[in-house]
Image (cartoon, rainbow, N blue to C red):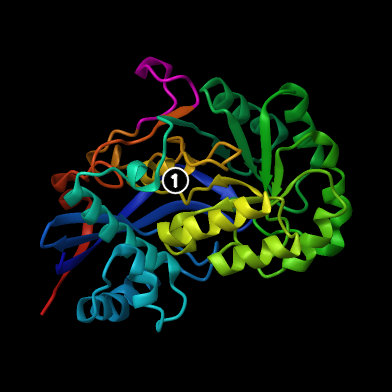
Amino acid sequence: MSIAGIELCWLDLTLERPVSTARGAHAARPVIVVRVLTSAGEGFGECAALAEPTYGYEHAEGAWQVMESRLVPRLLAEPPGSPAGLMSALAGLRGHRMAKAAIEMALLDADLRAAGLSLAEHLGVSVDRVPAGAVVGRMESQERLVEEVARLADGGALRVRIKWSAGDPNEWLRAVRERFPELLLQVDANGSYRPSGVAELLEIDSLGLACIEQPFGADDLLAHAWLAERISTPVCLDESLSSPERVAEAVSLGACSLACLKPACLGGFAAALEARETCLRAGVGMWCGGMFETSFARIANAAFAALPGFVLPGDLSTEARFVEGDLLGLSPEVPSPAGGMPPGTVRVHRGPGVAPPPDPSALARLASRREWFPAS
Ligand SMILES: [Mg+2]
């Protein structure tokens, strides 16, 4: 399969409900869609980089720039033999794993579509649905927090993840737990605690949380390992797990008893599979996190989350709805008792490609910037 060209499309999307986190609020959600045209057809990928470099150092504007000026020209000049070979083909260009993952996804999508295979078949997934969880942003009061959790739990979410920050009143979490004694609850601190503030964290250890996600900074593996020895709630890492090598390091240090794996942040599906192998070998449970992506990437993530070893529901529901509506003409298959699916589960896509292809007219309508890079 040879590459005829690559197109970058920039979509300025807005979340219907802005999500507030310890690192600021997410409302604007620029999405870069990569379209690759090969001798066998086309494929699509979506970039996870957010509007601002708050989750990691990558952000959408930077991802566009590095794709346009470095990654795409390099790829067109020296195409990898297969999508899985993309990371080694681009190994000379350090970092930028979200940008690379978007291109890998497009190549993989093209490959699978041409072969008539689904991502689920490619990964060896045997189940036909996966449990889905939802996210609650930081709220302004205890009442609002309890209300939001109730809305999601009533809507069928099997797990609710609460965005949390050092300094937020622990009694709010206690109130949620009292109202929902059985609900699978976890908190995501997005690295807002300092090791000196550990007493605050230990206070919520009795709430039976499924995990505390990323309490300390992304680079602070040792503090996480230290905490994991002193707290009974599982310590989960997210921002720290930025490459398969980093996952191996975190696991060997005992820095995480749970791993939030995001193919789009690890460098693509090949990298995510490597990280998953590491976790499986070490007996570390996993779940698949989200980046407020569109239904396209979410459907792809559902296939990954359907592999054995994923012990908590993933960020796979449609909580991240966009003002622009059902993006790219896709109909996300979400927790919907009316849709014939058990509540709280998402169907695993079984058609060709990583997800159903985006509707070209929706893409044309939503894209404010498009650039085509032909192979010479
Ligand atoms: Mg997180």
Task: Determine whether, in the image, residue 169 is placed left or right of residue 344.
Answer: right
Q: Secondary structure beneath disc 1?
A: helix
66 relative to 98, above or below: below
The residue closer to the viewer here, 220 or 119, is 119
Q: Find residue 247 and report its image quarter.
A: bottom right
Residue 66 is inside the magenta segment: no
Vertical position of residue 254 compared to residue 18: above or below: below
In front here: 121 or 263? 121
| Crowding at mark 1 (Cα within 10 Å: few <14, some 14-19, many 20+) | many
**Going by the image, does 213 lie left or right of 231?**
left
The answer, for residue 343, to whether it is visible in the render is: yes
Spot occupied by residue 110 in the image (x, y as percentages of width and height):
21, 55
Residue under the point 34% across and 70% down: 86
Residue span colored magenta? 333-344
Query: Residue 285 is drawn in which quadrant?
Result: top right
Q: How many marks?
A: 1
Look at 85% across and 56% down and name the residue there.
198
Is 109 left or right of 236, judged from the image as shown?
left
Residue occupied by mark 1: 304
Q: Position of residue 361 (x, y in %)?
A: 13, 46
Q: Is residue 189 among the parts visible in the rendering?
A: no
Camera-side residue of 27 and 316: 316
Residue 226 screen position, x and y as percent: 83, 61
Screen quadrant of the C terminus: bottom left
Check the image and report above or below for 19 versus 69.
above
Quadrant where the N terminus lies?
A: bottom left
Q: Residue 336 colored magenta?
A: yes
Measuring from the top left, give residue 205's x and y in whole percent: 83, 42
Q: Which residue type does callout 1 highlight? A: Phe
Predominant secondary structure in magenta? loop
Residue at 45% x, 80% y is 94
